[in-house]
């Protein structure tokens, strides 16, 4: 665990190194190189763990030791490529902390940074990793904030990515909104997911929501039955007599 003095020193070093990486690469090489060595060692530890769940727990435990560096890079706002920050962006999502990734993601999207050992552009990677993290949490009953997912949708609105990836993000957003008793908004996101990827698996959910939202027509008021009209009784006519009339 870092002391307050060590955290401050790391933060200042990150801010300075980030700013100097363009103007004075040699001076910035030492602190940044030290962080890369630390990162390499932690990666080796994680590589020896087979369980994805256990890896996530270890990443969550490692994140605080990198937090001062990340804070310094963000404060410097130099926009230079930083593999430490970008790795922490991924680890934060792997640890299930979507809202905790926002500042790093905005910075990475603003400057078009890349994630080491990954070919996906940052917008594509971020949208997909958020969708996967949220779906994992949702399926295991952990809380997922719909507002966080809506923020990510807005952040990655102009990012280029496969339609199937964007569909995943809209799908989990719709499922969370439905669980939050917001059927109209849920239907909009699930419909968008199906529009982007017909095989995204939301058809039944859409049909269920459409039934729920279908207006219930009030039962037609029973018409009063008309009173039966009184029958007119015709007077009975006396039967006509047969034969000739008598003479008077």
Image: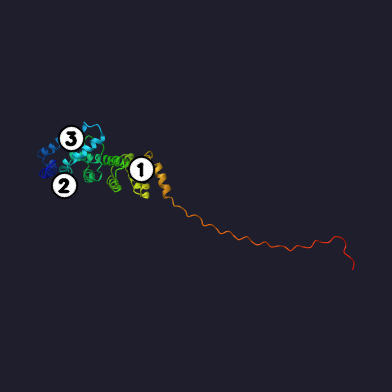
Q: Is residue 211 above or below residue 220?
A: above
| Secondary element at tag 3 | helix
Quadrant housing residue 162: top left
The one of 170 and 122 positioned closer to us in this rendering: 170
Give me the residue at 41% from left, 45% from top.
208
Alpha carbon distance from label 1 to label 3: 37 Å
Which one is earlier in the sequence, the residue at label 2 or at label 1? 2
Neighbour tally class for label 2: few under 14, some 14-19, many 20 plus, Cα within 10 Å: some
The one of 110 and 67 positioned closer to us in this rendering: 67
Residue identified by numbered label 2: 75
Residue 157 visible in rendering: no
Report the side of 231 relative to 3 (left or right). right
Locate residue 193, reporting x and y percent: 36, 43
Q: Is residue 177 above or below residue 83?
A: below
The one of 178 and 72 positioned closer to us in this rendering: 178
Quadrant housing residue 105: top left
Residue identified by numbered label 3: 42
Alpha carbon distance from label 2 to label 1: 36 Å
| Secondary element at tag 1 | helix
Residue identified by numbered label 1: 193
Report the side of 229 relative to 217 (left or right). right
The residue sitting at the bottom extreme is 248
- Tell me, for residue 105, which label it has, or none: none
Which one is earlier in the sequence, the residue at label 1 or at label 3? 3
């Amino acid at each position: 665990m870092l002391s307050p003095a060590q955290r401050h020193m790391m933060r200042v070093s990150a801010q300075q190194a980030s700013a100097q990486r363009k103007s004075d690469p040699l001076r910035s090489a030492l602190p940044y190189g030290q962080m890369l060595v630390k990162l390499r060692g932690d990666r080796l530890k994680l590589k020896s763990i087979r369980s994805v769940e256990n890896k996530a727990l270890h990443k969550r435990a490692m994140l605080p030791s990198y937090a001062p560096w990340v804070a310094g890079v963000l404060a410097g706002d130099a926009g230079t490529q930083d593999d430490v920050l970008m790795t922490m962006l991924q680890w934060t999502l792997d640890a299930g902390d979507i809202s905790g990734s926002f500042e790093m993601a905005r910075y990475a999207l603003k400057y078009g940074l890349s994630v080491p050992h990954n070919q996906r552009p940052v917008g594509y990677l971020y949208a997909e990793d958020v969708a996967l993290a949220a779906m994992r949490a949702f399926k295991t009953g952990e809380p997922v904030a719909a507002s966080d997912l809506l923020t990510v949708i807005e952040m990655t609105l102009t990012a280029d990515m496969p339609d199937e990836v964007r569909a995943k993000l809209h799908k989990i957003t719709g499922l969370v909104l439905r669980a939050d008793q917001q059927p109209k908004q849920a239907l909009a996101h699930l419909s968008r997911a199906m529009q982007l990827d017909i095989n995204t698996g939301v058809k039944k959910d859409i049909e269920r929501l459409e039934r729920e939202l279908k207006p219930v027509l009030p039962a037609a008021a029973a018409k009063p039955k008309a009173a039966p009209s009184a029958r007119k009784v015709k007077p009975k006519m006396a039967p006509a007599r047969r034969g000739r009339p008598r003479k008077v």
